[in-house]
Image (tube, rainbow, N blue to C red):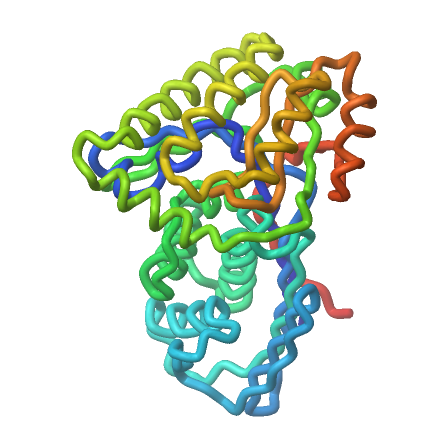
Amino acid sequence: MIIRSRAPLRLGLAGGGTDVSAYSDQYGGAILNATINKFAYATLMPLKLPQIVIKCHDINEHHIYDSVEEFDLSDNKLVLIKAIHNRIRREFNIKEPMFYQLETYVDAPPGSGLGSSSTLVVAIVAAFAEWLGLPLGDYDLAQLAYSIEREDVGLAGGRQDQYAATFGGFNFMEFYADRVVVNPLRIKQNYIYELEFSLLQYYTGTSRLSSKIIEAQVKNVCKAGDKSIEAMHTLKKIAYNMKESLLRGRLNDIGNLLNEGWISKKETADEISNPIVDEIYEAAMKNGALGGKISGAGGGGYMMFYVKNCFVHHLVNVLNQFGGQVERVHFYDKGVITWKTQD
């Protein structure tokens, strides 16, 4: 028997950073995001041999371990996968040895800003849940993935990625100290088609460690009266405004709101941008973009631009001159899925 799972990556459209506990616990956070047709994949194959085999094909990691009840997380190699193994055994009181081969692949590189690490955690946890028959609803799955990454491993970050990968589609999410509320949005299909036509993704070719940037944001938010708190308030307000614009089909407003959000985002931490990112953003704004942002925490990875429709192809040519990779956006309306096969 083989168990497979697939979870979608996401575009953060507005409110990014307000889902981090330092802010959301005190003020409440709001995020607008949407999943796209890039995925994290996990394949889980139970073994009879007393081994655990892990193959991460996208990063060329291949390791074989003797039967392990609990991994030592002090070795950072494959630490997220090891932490999932440990937490599954502990959380669900699994006493029997677990022998398996786990293979993974993600359509975007680490540090891309599309939530790739968190999405992969969701995919792997879902595969284990399918194999072991674990009683996990959508909120349970997302919260468990968040807890593994943020608490067990200690990586700084927010909560939107795990919930986006689990639920899928366009969602307006609200974050509080004691709960998360996911509000699926019913958006007219022609609005989605037009949004896909008007959005461009640009991969800068560089990745970044999002946890370091988020740690800087958390530090700034914890300073009473710091300008980063006001910037966070603005980002949350923009998320509400963008939700209304999207539902009403006022799509050009989205470009303007993206630009407003980018200006505020840079106020939350110095590491959000850099001279190269600023140069690319300025060139896009001079060549048809109404607004844009860096996906995820910032510092590198993917950038996103909303473009006046008559300038889309022109801007593609402009961005190509910077040596990165331009991609069109295609949304995906489902969350994580699992299935079994005998092949």
Q: Front-most of 326 and 41?
A: 326
Quarter of the image where the C terminus is located: bottom right
Residue shown at the point (52%, 72%) measured from the top left? 78
Seen as rendered, the residue at the extreme left is 224
Residue shown at the point (75%, 14%) measured from the top left? 309
Compared to residue 42, the image places residue 318 above or below, namely above
Q: Is residue 109 left or right of residue 270?
A: right
Q: Is residue 303 left or right of residue 24?
A: right
Q: Is residue 312 left or right of residue 108?
A: right
Q: Front-most of 119 and 339?
A: 119
Q: Front-most of 89 and 13?
A: 13
Q: Position of residue 161 (x, y in %)?
A: 48, 44
Q: Position of residue 6 (x, y in %)?
A: 63, 53
Q: Is residue 115 left or right of residue 26?
A: right
Q: Position of residue 122 (x, y in %)?
A: 51, 55
Residue shown at the point (49%, 81%) measured from the top left? 98
Compared to residue 121, the image places residue 288 above or below, namely above
Residue shown at the point (47%, 27%) measured from the top left? 14
